[in-house]
Image (cartoon, rainbow, N blue to C red):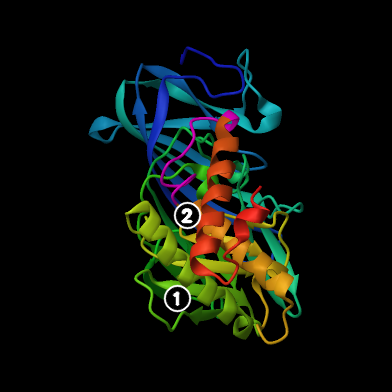
Amino acid sequence: MPTARIPGRLPAGVRPTRYDVSLRVDPRRERFEGTVSIALAVEVPTRTIFLHALDIAAKRVVLKGAGGRSIPGTLARATAQGSEPDEGEVEISLSQEASAGAATLEIAYDAPFNGQMAGLYRVKDRDDWYAFTQFEAADARRCFPCFDEPSFKVPLRATVAVPDGMLAFSNGPEESRQTRDGWTTFTFLETPPLPTYLVAFVAGALDVVQYRGRCATPLRALAARGKGEQTELALRFSAELLGVLEEYFGRPYPYAKLDIAALPEFSSGAMENAGLITFREELLLGYERTATRSRLRSMANVIAHEISHQWFGNLVTMRWWDDLWLNESFATFMATIAMVGATRWTSYWTRFG
């Protein structure tokens, strides 16, 4: 059994080294399906693996170890002393003891779209349905079984299948897409190491607007159908702010692309998901000719804050949530530097904090 239990955290003994997440998402329905393959480092022999999965119904659980040996398992609420099953902690009970070393845990499951805009949730806007995610602080576990703590920072490769006519996006650039039997499957390139709370998915009949100016980073805006034309201003702000931040840090933007997504319904103001920043729609959409000076300033500042997080909070991450204040403090500081350097609000230090 894993040992060294720390209150509020998963026990030591097994840790993830990579995720492969495959989702089948139709936001017109009430549930979605998924398969996750988690590469593990098993540090001590064990018959029990603890991780997170909330409101998830497992259909198949198997651990594959060295030499191709497969060990069936079952997923249930954690019962060990010190566990937190109400927070989504679960235990995988294996039919045989797993040896120490590298292994792969495979779980096929289905789950409901969340009704409180946490985890993977669905939204209807006009006549179209969309699926979005919000994982911070601990809701990735509602979308796929995972080690849902910020100290576990590993690469992730995602595949998302959606009904024909819909698009899907994730943290990595699209590698390929294939259409078959009424579904289009989008495969995304593997990400750099990420904690689960910075993983994101967006799907639906989205407008995609490519930034047409000069920017070293591939930059796009995503918006609900018919609203893409309202993203031009946000794209321009993003490109200008990126340039100032890259110069200040002395290193390029740390991810392969940047999508800024305007969500019709979103519980937070914005979320700094690596390479796929999500915003409440009213914070990102607008026309310069009709927006007030205050609204333009607010739009630029929230974009600056979330892009700053790509370095502070994403590239450099916290071990636990008690350091979240550092993420936010540094992002607020850097957003002010970016506002002064890239926008008309050169006296923005007077609004710092």
Which kind of residue does numbered mark 2 sit on?
Ala
Task: Kindly indicate the quadrant of the structure image that contains residue 185.
Answer: bottom left
Residue 156, placed above or below residue 180: above
Q: Which residue is drawn at 44% across and 49% down?
A: 311
Q: Is residue 28 visible to us here?
A: no
Q: Where is residue 287 in the image (x, y as percent from the top left)?
A: 67, 83
Q: Where is residue 280 in the image (x, y as percent from the top left)?
A: 69, 64
Residue position marked by numbered label 2 in the rendering: 274
Which kind of residue does numbered mark 1 sit on?
Arg
Q: Residue at x 68, y 31 (%)?
A: 87
Q: Which residue is drawn at 48% across and 12% down?
A: 4
Per the rendered image, the range of residues in magenta is 311-322
Count residues near mark 1 (Cα–Cα under 10 Å), then give few for <14, some for 14-19, many for 20+: few
The image's mark for residue 19 is: none
Foreground: 290 or 198? Answer: 290
Query: Is the magenta region chiefly helix, strand or loop?
Result: loop
Q: Is residue 29 visible to us here?
A: yes
Q: Mark 2 or mark 1, which is nearer the start of the sequence?
A: 1
Dots 1, 2 in contact, CB < 8 A: no
Residue position marked by numbered label 1 in the rendering: 180
* 247 left or right of 169 in image: left
Q: Does the magenta stretch include residue 93?
A: no
Residue 227, placed above or below residue 129: below
Question: Which residue, as the protein is rendered here, is positioned at the far left?
Answer: 67
Residue 84, placed above or below residue 195: above
Secondary element at tag 2: loop
Q: Where is residue 128 in the image (x, y as percent from the top left)?
A: 70, 77
Q: How far apart, in angstroms, are the residues tagged by discs 1 and 2?
A: 30 Å
Q: Does the magenta stretch include residue 320?
A: yes
Foreground: 348 or 153? Answer: 348
* 240 left or right of 29 in image: left
Q: Residue at x 67, y 73 (%)?
A: 296
